Image (spheres, rainbow, N blue to C red):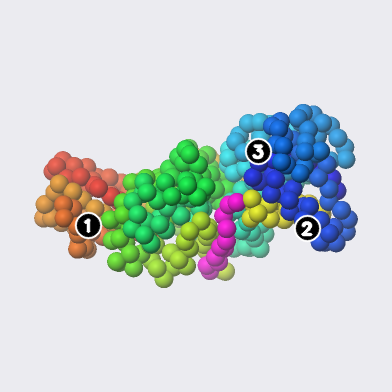
Amino acid sequence: MQVAILGCGVVGRGTADLLTANAEAIAARVGGPVTVKYILERREIPDCPYQALFVKDFETIVSDPEVSVVIEAMGGSHPAYDFSLRALEAGKHVITSNKEVVANFGVDLLRVAREKGVLYLFEASVGGGIPVLHPLASDLSGNLIDSISGILNGTTNYILTRMYEAGASFADALAEAQEKGYAEANPAADVEGLDACRKIAILAAIATGTLVRTGDIHTEGITAIRSADVSAASSLGYAVKLLGRMVRTAAGEFFLMVAPFLVDKANPLAGISDVFNGVMIHGNFVDNVLFYGRGAGACPTASAMVGDLLHVALGGAPYHSAWRAAEEGDLTDFSYFAARRYLAVGDCERNSVEVIFGDAEFLASPAGEIQLLTPPMSEREYEDKATRLSSCGGKILSHIRIL
């Protein structure tokens, strides 16, 4: 088997390294050598040991009948999507870690793959090296998946961990993550929840067969989380985690969301710290199943990419069935989603808060604010109460749902 890798950045280089380092074991596993024939890379990378494989023209790859698998490690939507589509149309299997392409174009790419009799695989797009998509699509497929709750972004989990362990502010924890290389210079996709949004869209598509546009998913990040909120949560026996969630309703529809949640410390997700990821899946027969591991990085992502490659080499069937694009009525109106909430309120008397939020549990609070846990209420009910509070001169300083 001869393969081509698109891109020689962190993921592409890591995949080439794994295929080189474990070449003998891989050949023994699949019954023959797996060779990287080309690496599409337009930059000059003087210290790269794979320079002899570099090509600058995608036509060299797509027109070569000896290349049966294309590994896309470019990032971004374009030209990654365009190259993936052309490779599939040329009858080549495509493997990717690109959650942006899968979340935006997965319906079309899976359809073309099926029409051409090839595989479009993307285990590495969610959870880095954690094998979660394949088990969800195959081993758990006999279950009705009731819910998925995942820590899907290592950068935000690292920031929240530092806020908990060191009492750091969000700004200081973010600066530390950037210094360590866990966060980009522009961390918006991570801290504003977009990265996790793409990943929960993919997980939900496998669980339901329906791919929801990321723009239709309620998405919040962690930029508003304060050290005072993390401290209050800890004192109550909770950890603050940014979760991507799918929750199926009794009517068969489902909610999709990305938001910070208070997670009870008895829940295994609460103990997942640093840059690690974890995904909790509940099936109606299997109950809860937890997937845990490194969610990013060259080596974990390469592990997932090569796992998909071996799936191809061993003649595996497609483990992702065709998806359809979400239609009106598939996704439940988020205003009906109900949960208990932690609130911090400022510029308001306690009796006004008691009148508005009803049977709430009031907490020992820092000077200048009132912290409380509300009874369960829908998003619509919460917005109505927040509006009433504002009309009394009060201000919501912090709002976090409770898992």
Question: Is residue 132 part of the magenta span, yes or no?
Answer: no
Q: Quadrant of residue 103?
A: top right
- State the residue lying farthest toward the bottom: 266
Secondary structure of the residue carrying tag 3 is loop
Q: Position of residue 146 (x, y in %)?
A: 51, 60
Please say whether residue 137 is visible from this viewpoint: no
Say whether disc 2 or disc 1 marks the residue closer to the N-terminus.
2
Q: Is the Cβ of the residue at disc 3 closer than 8 Å to that at disc 1?
A: no
Label 2 sits on a secondary structure element that is loop
Q: Is residue 319 left or right of residue 399?
A: right
* Badge 1 amino acid: Gln
Q: Is residue 396 visible?
A: yes
The quadrant holding residue 94 is: top right
Give the residue pinned by disc 1: 371
Check the image and report above or below for 336 versus 282: above
**Disc 2 target residue:** 22
- The residue stretch that appears in magenta: 287-297
User: Residue 86: x and y, percent?
Assistant: 75, 33
> Badge 3 local density, few (<14 within 10 Å), some, or many (20+)?
many
Sequence-wise, the earlier of marks 3 and 2 is 2
Position in image of residue 343 (x %, y %): 26, 54
Which percent across, then down, holds residue 288? 52, 67
User: At 66% across and 46% down in the image, what residue appears?
Assistant: 11
* Residue indicated by mark 3: 74
Q: Amino acid at mark 3?
A: Met
The residue at 52%/47% (across/down) is 181
Q: Amino acid at mark 2?
A: Asn
